[in-house]
Every structure is written in structure tokens, then in C-alpha cells.
Amino acid sequence: MRKDVDDLNTGNLKKALVVDDSAFMRKLISDFLSGHPGIEVIGTARNGKEAVEKVKSLKPDVVTMDIEMPIMNGLEALKEIMSNYPVPIVMLSSTTEIGAENTMLAMEYGAVDFVAKPGGAISLNLHEVKEEILGKVIAASDVEMSTLTRKMTSRRLPRPNSSRSTVNPVASVTETVAFSANQSQLMNISKNKISKTGKTFVIIGTSTGGPRALQEVLTGIPASFGVPILVVQHMPPGFTKSLADRLDGLCAIHVKEAEDGELLENGTAYIAPGGKHLKMIKKGLTYCVRLDSVDPPRMGHRPSVDVLLESAAENNELNFLTVIMTGMGYDGKKGMEVLRKNGKTITLAESAKTSVVYGMPKAIKEAGFADKVVDLHDISETIIGIIKS
């Protein structure tokens, strides 16, 4: 029996609180959610102050929260709720530059996910993202709160004032990172899976919960890291640049939104732009970015982890360290199968313990593609250990 129907029959409906300063938006979102057999809207709030009070009194299972509101905005309410009455929250955001920046802050503060309003603050065409709202609200309602309230690892590795280093990290990485992972196990994985003769690339794929996970991982990578990093984070257009800029300000390595045709350089993480597939191609003796907005989305996603991994598999002279982290669905499973068949890769999957949504890494593990299952706070250390070994 379908889970949502089963919930309906047993009376175990997910209780939702809708927060928006627009009466029209509150009604529209409430109608969307009430029309789902597994959701009951138990209240609405007009601003962040009301939201905090109603979360405390009504104890919802999930909250939809507008960011731009009077009296107390969505960010302020989110911080107070997550500090005192933690509950899964899905943000609704505008696609303006400020809206995108605030959305990235919301992810850092503990929001599960967000939905971009297609028509601004008052979206008459909100029905265009109805299924996305429903899917993300249902997914958020099942999240283990410990994955959202766990304190982020505090690490700000030094970034050199001079131009970014592209040296091999073997000699210097232990000076900046306290390494405690199982060295012998990592070395055995490396020897069996990748070659010392080829250049290595790191590929990271993630979705729901990904912005916080990426911050945890990328802030643990030192500036001396001598490998390029390619990242697919499921996001709509207009948000990935804000994510990249925010991470760049927090990390020792350089983090940027990928640009078509640019060379892939060591010590830089390239985030796929929303609305475009990220591919890697060989150009002479170097490798560069290819962005594709023509190929259709895969399983609703563009960028897609599968597409990036399939493009990587075409370069079978290279070594890859692939990392699949928190996210709904199974994007990355098909591409990983292709890469493991045609190329040389070590595959890490985030553990169920730390994944906000244990979908994408679970698919990798259950398919037998995971060489190692790793808690989120150990992933950067494990990456460094494998590259070193």
C-alpha cells in the first residue's frame, strides 16, 4: 500500500503549518497541501512572530515558510524555531539576487529545502510548482531532526594570500588537517580502484540537505588540495551562484559556479549552474567544463549527477573519487554504474545516520557501488586520505 494512503487510513496525517504574509498565498499553499491524502494543514501564520508562536502551540510535523515577511522575517523565525522548537521547514523564496542569498542562509540555519516562487512574492502561477511543494513537504516531514540540528563542524582552514596553490597535497595536507581515518583501509581501496599514473578528479553529487553538507565537506579541504572538484547540487536557476559565492567565502579552496569552456584547475570546486547539465570534456592535454541546457532533465533534474558521471566515464584515462551525499531519489545510480564499468573510481556514500534524506546515497549503497560508507563530518578527511594514499 502507498505510504500516503496508509497514513490516511491510520489517521497518521502529517500536520503542516503554512507561513506567508499574503492571504492569497496562504490559501493557495494550504489548498495544495490539504489536497494531498497524507497532509493536514493545522494552521497558518502571517509573519515570523506568529509562526514561532504557532510552532510552539500546534507542534506541526512540517512548516512552509516565506522568507520576506513583516514584523519578523522568515530567516529570523527559522533561527528561533530551530533553536527552541526544531521542526522540518521548507522555505519559499523569490529568485532575486537577495532572495537567493537569503535562501542559502536559510539552508545554513537548518531549513530542509526550498521552493523558488515562479512569479515573485505573490505568485499567481504557483500551481507550476505544486508537485515540487508537495514532494518537498512530504520528504521534509520524514526527516530525522538530529540531522538538521547537529552542529556544523567549525573549521576555517587558512587561505593563502598569494595565488592559489596547485601543488600535489601529499606533503602539505597533514599540516592543515588532523587526519585520523583508517589509513591502511583507505590505501587498500586506493590501490585496488585507481591508478597512480592518471590525473584524479573529485565528483560530488547531492540534493536535499546538500548546501549544508557541501559546507561541511568543502570547508574541510585545504588550499593545497591538488585536485579539481566538480559538484552537482540539485537547484533551480538563480540560486547556484549564491551557493558558490557563499561557500567560496567560507572555504580555503576556491568555489565557483562553473562556466562553459573554462579549464578545470586544481584546488577549485565547480558547482553546476541551475538549469544546465555539467559535463567534463578533454581539450588537448587539458580538461574543461561543458554546460548543456539542451539535453532534457534526468528524473526532473538539470543539472543531473548521472549526466556528469557519464561524461566522466568517457575519459577512462582518468581517476575519479566520487561522493554521493544526502538527497531524494536515486540520481547518480545509473551514472555510477557507467563510470565504474568504464573508468577507475573510488565511491563514497554518505551514511544514513547523517543524511538529511537517505535516498541518493542509499541507492548507491544498495546497488553495491559504495566502496566506503562515511558519516558527513568524516567525508572531507576521507577524501584527503584517499588522495594522499
Image (spheres, rainbow, N blue to C red):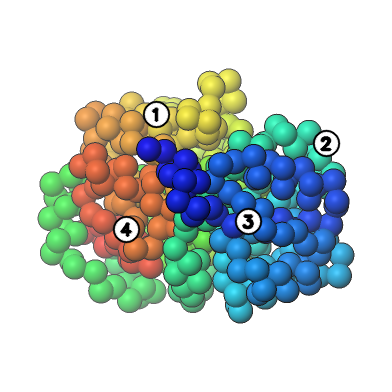
Residue at left offset 49%, top offset 54%: 12
User: Residue 311 got which mark?
Assistant: 1
Tell me the CA gap for discs 3 and 2: 22 Å
Spatial separation of the CA atoms under disc 1 and disc 3: 41 Å
Q: Position of residue 343 (x, y in %)?
A: 25, 33
SS class of the residue under badge 1? helix
Between discs 2 and 4, the one toward the N terminus: 2
Q: Earlier in the sequence, mark 3 or mark 2?
A: 3
Nearer mark to the viewer, of 3 and 2? 3
The reply to whether dot 4 and dot 1 touch (C-beta < 8 Å) is no
Q: Nearer the viewer, residue 176 or 168?
A: 176
Identify the residue under disc 3: 16
Amino acid type, mark 2: Leu
| Cα–Cα gap, marks 2 and 4 | 40 Å
**Seen in the image, is 188 located left or right of residue 333?**
left
Q: Which mark is residue 124?
A: 2
Q: Could you tell me how far apart the alpha carbons at marks 4 and 1 are, in whole angstroms?
A: 26 Å
